[in-house]
Each structure stands twice: as C-alpha cells, then as structure tokens.
Amino acid sequence: MADFVQTSNTKTAVRELAAPIADATTFSTIVQGVISNNPFGCTAYTYGDVPQDPVMKSREAYTAYVLYEDAEAKTIGNITARAKTVAGFSAAITEILANAALAAAMGGDAVRDPDAENYSCTLKCHDASGEVYYVTFSRDQVRVSSYSDDAIMATIETWADTVPALA
C-alpha cells in the first residue's frame, strides 16, 4: 500500500482585533481597499484558460440582529437576517425595522442590535510567487490561511499595522 507524502506546508495566522470593526461600512471599506489598491502586491493569473484577478472575493456574509422590546425595553423576541452583500444587509435592516405587521406579531418595537452584528469576507489572493492564499476578515479578527511563504504574512502584517480598525 502506498504512503501519503507531504507535498506542501501551509500555514494559518490570526490577528485578534483589540475592538470589533465598528460597522458594515467600515468593514466594507477595508475589504474593498484591499481589492482596489492591492496592498499585498498580488498578481493576475490564468486558471483553466480563465483570467483571474489578483485579489477577489471568494465569499462574504453580513448578519444583522433586530430585537423586539416591550414597553419596559425588555427583549421579547429577535430576528436575524443574513445577506451576501452590504447593500442587501442594509436593505434587510431597513425593511425589518419598518415592518409594522411584523412588530405587532412579535409584540414589541423593533430595535437594531449593532453590537451583535457579524461581517465576514474571504479574499482569494495570488502572490507574485504563484502561491494562492486566503485572507478572511471578520468583525473581530483577520485570518490568513493556506500560505507557506513567511514573506506573505510579513506583507499582510505590515499593511494591517497601517489600518487603525485592524489594531
């Protein structure tokens, strides 16, 4: 029987943020800045005859929490809404907060709970060396995964040090 032979040594690194990213707009600005400005020096490439961008979103999600409170501001119910984009996230919050029939059915007033919101976006990055790795942003951490070259991590860490929300 054949043995498995290690062919690569990939790593994962996590930066826990001192404070959660304030809101979806700030979060989206950070992510879009990486895509637009390419601070990691990523390069375009071709995969299966299909041109690939140097940095691209591979997945994202935004989760909103809305509480329903009675006259004494006691929580009597809640709703969670998950969207694939910031625009969908914002639209869902607006619709839920404005839905009088839903508030009546829940038996209280709808109140947004921004501290409970979650945001996540994973970027697929292609290093100039040919290595493909992922940078996942969430509200309280940044994770770099599937990299083997320590220079990749050093570049990302240097960049992250310049972004106040990622302290």
Image: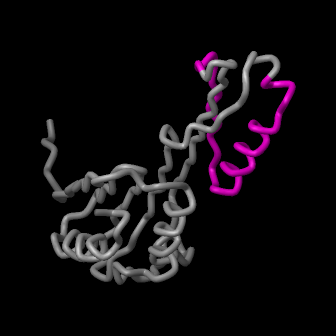
Specify whether residue 135 is painted magenta.
no
Nearer to us in this view, 71 or 32: 71
Specify whether residue 76 is painted magenta.
yes
- Residue 96's x, y, as percent? 75, 36
Nearer to us in this view, 18 or 72: 72
- Residue 29's x, y, as percent? 52, 69
The reply, left or right, for residue 10 in relation to residue 40 is left
Quadrant location of the C terminus in the rendered image: bottom left
User: Magenta residues?
Assistant: 74-103
- Residue at image position (83%, 33%) is 99
The reply, left or right, for residue 43 in relation to residue 75 is left
- Residue at image position (19%, 65%) is 148
Q: In this rendering, is residue 109 above or below 86?
A: above
Quadrant location of the N terminus in the rendered image: top left
- Residue at image position (30%, 70%) is 160
The reply, left or right, for residue 84 in relation to residue 102 is left
- Residue 130's x, y, as percent? 32, 76
Q: How many marks?
A: 0
Q: Quadrant of residue 106?
A: top right
